[in-house]
Image (cartoon, rainbow, N blue to C red):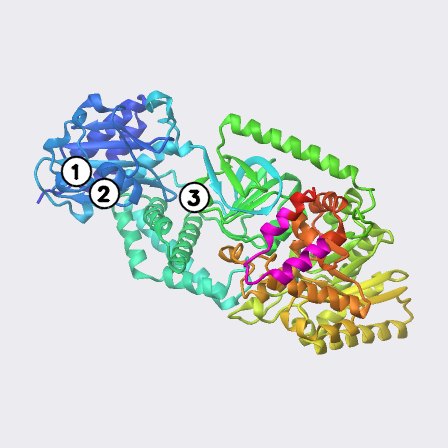
Amino acid sequence: MRSALGGPRVLLRRLREVMAEPVSAQARLDKIVMVIAANMVAEVCSFYVMRADNTLELFATEGLKREAVHLTTMKAGEGLVGLIAKQAEPLSLSNAQSHPSFSYRPETGEEIYQSFLGVPVLRSGNTLGVLVVQNRAHRVYMEEEVEALQTTAMVLAEIIASGELQALASQGNGIALRRAMVLPGQSLADGVGLGYAVLHEPRVVVSNLIADDPAVEQRRLDAAIAELRSSIDQLVDRGDVAHGGEHREVLETYRMFANDPGWTRRLREAVQTGLTAEAAVERVQSDNRARMLRQTDPYLRERLHDLDELANRLLHRLLGRDMIDGRVTLPENAILIARSMGPAALLDYDRSKLRGLVLEEGGPTSHIAIVARALGIPAVGTVENITGSVETGDAIIVDGGAGQVHVRPQSDVEEAFKEKARLRARRQEQYRKLRDVPSHTKDGVSVALHLNAGLLIDLPHMDETGAQGIGLFRTELQFMVSARMPTTNEQMALYRTVFDATRGRPVTFRTLDIGGDKILPYLRTAEEENPALGWRAIRIGLDRPGLLRAQLRAMLKAATGQHLRIMFPMVATVDEFDRAKALVKREMAHLERYGYTLPESIKLGVMVEVPSLLFEIDEIASRADFLSVGSNDLMQFLFAADRENPQMASRFDPLSPSCLRALQMVARAGQKAGIPVTLCGELASMPLEAMVLIGLGYRTLSMSPASIGPVKAMLLELNALAIEKHLNHLLTEANGVATLRPALEAFARDHGVPV
Ligand code: PEP
Ligand code: MG
């Protein structure tokens, strides 16, 4: 049986020589295919490059007719070459012409070649081209030959990525790597952001591919794997939350993969072919990424993602960088790209330089989305393989409203979006003009529009938007952005600043709502199967009263001479509220004993976000000074649909009869008990939904700053009595419909209400 002449190491050495020659790009490619053909004892070696129009074009060949170069093309999926590109997998055939996908191209003269071996040219899981060798005789290519060709394909991927081939494509077609793309996703935060890609966890780009001394590379690889294993062991031993919010389960998976003999064997084999240790990791990972992109089973896909992450860590080790400590400093006009990200990580970045956020995960009510909205950063989530599709510095447009991301946009698209951004700014200007217009419906019903806040940067939004107060101050954000537990004095200082900024307008502080996805790196908590249903919010507060009492004390002290409003998150029973109230009383007594002046007034409220409260709603309303519906959690628990899971994001509609009846129940209980009821979840931020809430009887809505203008514009045109009547009618008639959205949209349209 024939085998490669001198093997892959000799081939790589020859390729390195060719790469160093000062010749034109075409001449280099011509030499490369010649070298490959000779080394692999093949009569043909051809290299196809994926163009921006999704067509594969023959860029170089040894053995086929030279006239076919830059003439022969095929679509992805067409012919054997197209099939390889589509499947992103090698294809080895001893009788190519009998394959159903074989397509005959007379200009190439390839009909005389029987055997065919083709591999995809991959980079970050994307197919950039196809590399083929062919032989006249029937032959079976050995596994080592397939691997040698894949290794060679990596070198070609680097050549494509260098941009050197850009001008060679026929008829002015660009090549795929720099192709403009529009990627769909889900809207997380409205707005248009133009800027340049910054990867939250930068991928290591390996450009040094060919080893000087394979034995040295082998030792480097072994050392890095050993270091990686021990660092993961340490992370696992340190527990769940120590670093970047990783969960134990993920770390355990890393540990399993890091110790997987199959993975290490493949890495070592790749080094033996003459690659540097880094290139070997990239080579093995490239196959994995391609598999990942084709994988439809979410569980397996997730595991492949874990393996990808592990490979990235290994690359960082090889380059002597510590990934966790390597925080990226943002350039101007940055569009942050991440697979997933916690709210604290986002808050770590310099807001003034951030123009947009794109995630592979993250649903619209996830906390990262809430923080993005609070920061006014246009954001799109669930964008498939965004981290593999862009490179640092690529031009990106985030269309938050449409939930789309434009990667490397053409200049006309860019111009159109600049115009859109200008229009938006003009619209914002119009909203600003509404700032001082009293927020009354057309029939004179006054609806207070409040702001959701949590950080100092939110406070100027009060005056900018004309919000009548802060309806939800998420106190946990201060804890999340801090590297250690904020002291009582630090908490008090923040609350004082909030009082100063509100200048007499009401502000409702919510006590710490941590747990679930809001992890404090410095607070050790036990492993939980279902953190959203676990030890969080008021549950932690009541079980660890020290923490809650310190916070209550900070609030009470900060509110000297002020009207203090406190509400408790995730209350599930009346008893929990009673106990929380008792803690407040105790702190008040304590402060009085030490001569502190108490606030002018203290109002204690309950967030209605756990459905059990719906069935004790009158009891809770009779004890509370006010209620505030947390529709994000209430929806999640009503429908048993994880708010962080993008697949659940549009599965259930809050405008469904069941949800609206639940919301109506709370509003009516408040009216009956004579206490105010607010809604502070994301529902209030959307004009159509806000219209419905007014119809259900809500008179205070608390929302993200960018929503105050659009919601006010809506209610100024609304007749509250008309929507109330219509809604009651719809709810009575709604016999099993999944959602009332179309009917409500029709109402808005018919009544000229801008939603
Ligand atoms: C909610 O659940 O609707 C809410 C306002 O609180 P958070 O989003 O912070 O959980
Ligand atoms: Mg909540």
Tell me how far mark 1 sits from mark 2, CA to CA.
9 Å
Q: What kind of residue is marked 1?
A: Met
Q: Where residue 440 sits in the image (x, y, percent)?
A: 81, 48
- Compared to residue 165, the image places residue 341 above or below, namely below
Q: Is residue 343 magenta?
A: no
The residue wearing badge 1 is 40
If the picture is divided into quarters, which one holds ligand 2? bottom right
The amino acid at mark 2 is Ala
The first of marks 3 and 2 along the sequence is 2
Reading the chain from its start, which is encountered first: label 1 or label 3? Answer: 1
Give the amino acid at mark 3.
Gly
Comparing 731 with 385, the one in front is 731
Q: What is the spatial separation of the Cα atoms under label 1 and label 3, in whole angstroms? A: 31 Å
Residue 596 percent coordinates (x, y) = 90, 68
Q: Secondary structure at mark 3?
A: helix
On whether residue 741 falls in the magenta region, the answer is yes
Tell me whether circle 1 and circle 2 mark residues in contact (CB < 8 Å). Answer: yes
Residue under the image location 11 percent in, 34 percent down: 113
Say which label, 1 or 2, has the lower sequence index. 1
User: On the picture, is 89 further left or further right than 619?
Assistant: left
Residue position for label 2? 148
Q: Is mark 3 within 8 Å of ligand 1?
A: no
Residue 305 drawn at (x, y percent): 41, 54
Mark 1 crowdedness (10 Å alpha carbons): few <14, some 14-19, many ≥20? many
What secondary structure do most residues of the magenta stretch adopt?
Answer: helix
Residue 292 vs residue 682, the one in the foreground: 682
Residue 685 image position (x, y, % from top left)? 67, 50
Decide if residue 733 is on the left or right side of residue 673. Answer: left
Q: Which residues are magenta?
A: 723-746
